[in-house]
């Protein structure tokens, strides 16, 4: 689900790999399996990250059928925090925190606030609409990231970016299917309200994650490590949702072992997925990683059918494909802009 902070400082390693590969003959590169996997290691790691995070999303879908979404998010983010914080301590990155500038700390707090809100909203959305629909809407995040980049960082927005943004809106509309656009005979008013609410929550999550993504770029420029970012984001999410669970008096449901265990597993898987994405970004171009991450929509829908046993509406499938197309287009457009700016 959040994952999309680009660690530009780690890309130098990819350049070292290219130098080593240039010293090999073409026949050696094509015939040697080790060289092949070495060359495309970033892509393989990204695919693995997508699979892991898709299972994490499915865990949320299963847990929210029994537990309150805020309680699920507390358990989910607690597992994430423990795993990410252990990585921060073991790697020694925790000792670098003392050397952070005040501006880096401020950006870290802003990132934690926006990310915690985003994760809270998407998990709440999954409680109202199928996980495949929620993740499809969430993947419209690059559109909002482009808007925030234009507003906050001064990045250019081309006509193609505006067209792709409209495509995302069309895709979201096909998933939401509001009654004033799509008339469905015999439709239940209560289920329609839940769908609209779920879509609104997922859109809010996409916007919050996009803001977190833009802030994350600032953090990478200030040499804040990904382990620290994930740990802080998870900690803020635990604090926010613990307060919401206390207000709603949902702590009594924590004795239901099965959904609690599934929530903890989901958080652990999501942390692993995020770490894998950061590793992939150190070995592969950001545009390739972004395009592969967009395919999470397909994996989540597949798991929704196989595990949750819920077949999506055909219009939702069309909307998801449109959003997928727009996400890939936005990634390619951004890569071209970066290349022109070099």
Image (tube, grey):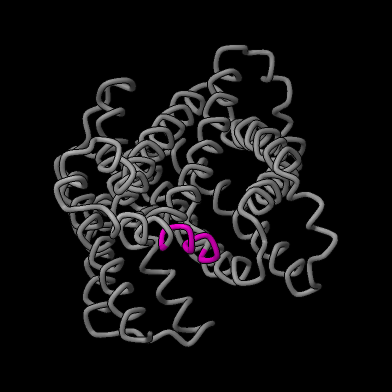
Q: Name the spot of residue 54 as percent of width and height, x first.
A: 38, 35
Residue at the spot x=27%, y=46% of the render? Answer: 295
Residue 43 relative to residue 90: left or right = left
Q: How many marks?
A: 0
Q: Name the spot of residue 74 as percent of width and height, x first.
A: 66, 35
Pick whichever, 176 or 85, lies toward us. Answer: 85
- Quadrant including the C terminus: bottom left
Residue span colored magenta: 8-15
Q: Name the spot of residue 297 as percent of width and height, x first.
A: 29, 44
Residue 256 relative to residue 101: left or right = left
Image vertical order of residue 15 relative to residue 321, above or below: below
Image vertical order of residue 193 relative to residue 147, above or below: above
Residue at the spot x=59%, y=55% of the render? Answer: 115
Residue at the spot x=56%, y=38% of the render? Answer: 271
Magenta part, dominant SS: helix
Residue at the spot x=22%, y=35% of the render? Answer: 312
Is residue 9 within the magenta segment? Answer: yes
Pick whichever, 220 or 28, lies toward us. Answer: 28
Is residue 257 within the magenta segment? Answer: no
Q: Name the spot of residue 224 as percent of width and height, x first.
A: 67, 61
């Amino acid at each position: 689900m959040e994952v999309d902070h680009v660690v530009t400082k780690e890309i130098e390693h990819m350049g070292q790999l290219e130098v080593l590969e240039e010293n090999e003959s073409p026949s050696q590169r094509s015939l040697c399996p080790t060289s092949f996997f070495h060359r495309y290691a970033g892509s393989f790691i990204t695919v693995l990250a997508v699979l892991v995070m898709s299972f994490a999303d499915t865990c949320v879908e299963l847990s929210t059928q029994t537990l309150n979404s805020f309680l699920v998010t507390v358990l989910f983010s607690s597992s994430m925090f423990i795993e990410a914080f252990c990585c921060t301590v073991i790697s020694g990155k925790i000792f670098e925190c003392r050397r952070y500038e005040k501006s880096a700390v401020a950006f870290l707090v802003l990132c934690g606030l926006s990310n915690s809100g985003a994760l809270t909203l998407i998990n709440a959305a999954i409680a109202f609409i199928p996980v495949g629909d929620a993740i499809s809407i969430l993947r419209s995040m690059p559109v909002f990231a482009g808007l925030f980049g234009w507003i906050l960082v001064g990045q250019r927005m081309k006509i193609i970016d505006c067209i792709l943004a409209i495509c995302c809106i069309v895709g979201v509309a096909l998933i939401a299917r509001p009654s004033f656009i799509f008339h469905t005979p015999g439709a239940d008013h209560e289920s329609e309200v839940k769908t609209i609410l779920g879509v609104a929550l997922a859109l809010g999550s996409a916007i919050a994650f996009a803001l977190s993504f833009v802030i994350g770029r600032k953090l990478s420029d200030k040499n804040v490590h990904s382990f620290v970012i994930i740990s802080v984001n998870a900690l803020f999410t635990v604090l926010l949702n613990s307060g919401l669970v206390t207000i709603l008096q949902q702590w009594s449901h924590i004795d239901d072992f099965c959904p609690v265990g599934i929530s903890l597993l989901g958080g652990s898987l999501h942390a692993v997925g995020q770490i894998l994405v950061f590793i992939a970004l150190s070995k592969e171009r950001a545009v390739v990683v972004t395009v592969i991450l967009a395919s999470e929509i397909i994996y989540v829908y597949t798991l929704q059918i196989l595990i949750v046993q819920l077949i999506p509406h055909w219009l939702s499938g069309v909307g998801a494909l449109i959003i997928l197309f727009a996400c890939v287009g936005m990634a390619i457009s951004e890569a071209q802009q970066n290349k022109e700016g070099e």
